[in-house]
Image (spheres, coloured by chain):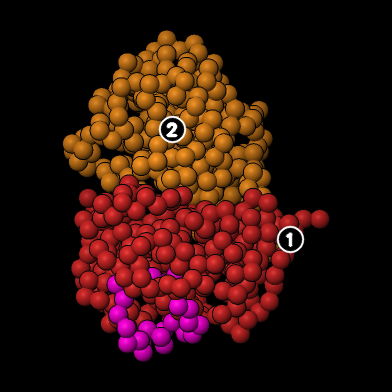
Chain colours: A orange, B red
Amino acid sequence: MSLFFSEDYEHADVQIRFEIKETLFSECSQFQKIEVFKSKFFGKMLVIDDALMLTERDEFVYHEMIAHVPLFVHPNPRRVLIIGGGDGGTVRECLKHTAVEQVDLVDIDEMVSRVCLRFFPEIAMPLTTKRVRCQFEDGVAFVKNCAEKYEVIIIDSTDPVSVGEGLFTREFYRDCSNILTDDGILVNQSESPAWQPNEVAAISQKLKSVFPKVYFYQAHTPTYLPGHWAFGFASKKHHPIDDFSAGSYQKSQLFFKYYNAEVHKSAFALPMFFRDLLALKRE
Amino acid sequence: MSLFFSEDYEHADVQIRFEIKETLFSECSQFQKIEVFKSKFFGKMLVIDDALMLTERDEFVYHEMIAHVPLFVHPNPRRVLIIGGGDGGTVRECLKHTAVEQVDLVDIDEMVSRVCLRFFPEIAMPLTTKRVRCQFEDGVAFVKNCAEKYEVIIIDSTDPVSVGEGLFTREFYRDCSNILTDDGILVNQSESPAWQPNEVAAISQKLKSVFPKVYFYQAHTPTYLPGHWAFGFASKKHHPIDDFSAGSYQKSQLFFKYYNAEVHKSAFALPMFFRDLLALKRE
């Protein structure tokens, strides 16, 4: 007998079916259904509300790209705020930077972190370290009421539906801007330009209505179909390439599986159709 | 009732299911099963032996990237040989270059071109133009016996199984090298570094045993899962970035949907795991 986990991409009339060996966990939290499957090729997989969140095989792509791009641009990213990201992967990458003194993680659903600590310890254990403060509450409310300031904010959210919806509004971006330092940077996961062009364009417009500098970059994310994923880079001062710190990168001596200095810069080279949907000039 | 076309990626224990509205064509040629489906999101889709070859929605990515990268590097690509590519998409892109005087297309299966002329005229019509010579025969034998020379050879093949297998051998690459000019360039589709790392590594080793300069580049191909596709760039003389002709690019005034000068250069910036599988030095 074969067992499958199927994820629907209804906007593209496509479904992907992963053959799985075993269901390791399946429970509903107060907010969502959380499942862990085991696959031969992808290792363990975290699924929330029938959407694939991460696989052991390729989670490094998304987590390295959402964390290191802003952290090698900001010259002194002492305080980082992560909204969402309860699995711990983005925290793990942020902690690799010695300049980062404090990571605040705000995820609405504590059960995600508990499940990840149990089934994905290599990803989630960094959540338990001293430089990290986890708060399980609504990120929208947290940002609105926060009295602290951050150099970098990373929005590591689910799709703009259900609990993730509030993390894609102009109001939320404005509240984020208010708690960023004067040279702060916000990065957010921004869906796929190939299959969700309207969503990417909407995120761009909202970010541009709040931030003086908005750019997009991309990565090859195998299990976020169609493998072409966008990240927003919204900044008060720093430019993502001109202010990339090659010196910090070289000094860091960090071991990456996806990221490197050339990948950093080239991730901002957008294909024509992506430039078009952002209404950028054709070169 | 819903109708689906399913493609198995057995190497990754994954299946993708496209909801289709209609089967427009389904017949077996002497070599393979050829089908055309219609989907709401992707438009018409060409399927050969149950593997998706192209969709109207995103064929531009693969065809632009396999053609324009070598053609904007070689300073005078007068004669181009395409092995495979019977759908006509690569021919269409090559013909956009005024420097290209002659395109020879060699595909083993004439029925592919006939079906594409009928169902995908925007893609296949360039096959019928004056600068193009179509020959329906085995590419391996053609290259072995060819007396002409080409500035650029493009291997636009299916996967390295069945009729495509002979297009991935060292002997074939050597025969290609023999019919390239002294400054010739060969480009080939090289599978996915994320899901077929061993295949990519094998292609690299075989190309390196024949050509003095071998590089790889990549593109976001939504419907060639997992959307991270590799192309080999094997060259006798020219470097894919140092010899990129910005002047020709600007003068060409061509309209692209994916390709541009920045995309050309950044496509060669490989993620660490891709560098690792090619045994390249970590930066």
Give the foreground label among 2 and 1. 1
Is the residue under label 1 in contact with that under label 2 (CB below 8 Å)?
no
In which chain is the residue bearing label 1? B
Q: Which disc, if any, is residue A265?
A: none
The residue labelled by disc 1 is B22
Q: Looking at the image, is A143 positioned above or below residue A87?
A: above
Residue A251 falls left or right of residue A217: left
Q: Looking at the image, is B50 positioned above or below residue A226?
A: below
Identity of the residue furthest to the bottom in this view: B145
The residue labelled by disc 2 is A232
A213 or B96, which is in the foreground? B96
Rendering coords of residue A108 (x, y %): 56, 25
**Crowding at label 1, few (<14), some or many (≥20) Cα neighbours within 10 Å?**
some
Residue type of the residue flagged with mark 2:
Gly
Rendering coords of residue B31 (x, y %): 58, 82
Secondary structure beneath label 2: strand
Magenta residues (range): B133-157
For the point 34% across and 20% down, the residue is A236
For the point 52% across and 33% down, the residue is A201
Could one spot residue A105 in this view of the protein? no
Rendering coords of residue A194 (x, y %): 52, 46
Q: Quadrant of the C terminus of chain A?
A: top left
Q: Looking at the image, is B236 positioned above or below residue A144?
A: below
Residue type of the residue flagged with mark 1:
Glu
Rendering coords of residue A91 (x, y %): 40, 33
**Crowding at label 2, few (<14), some or many (≥20) Cα neighbours within 10 Å?**
many
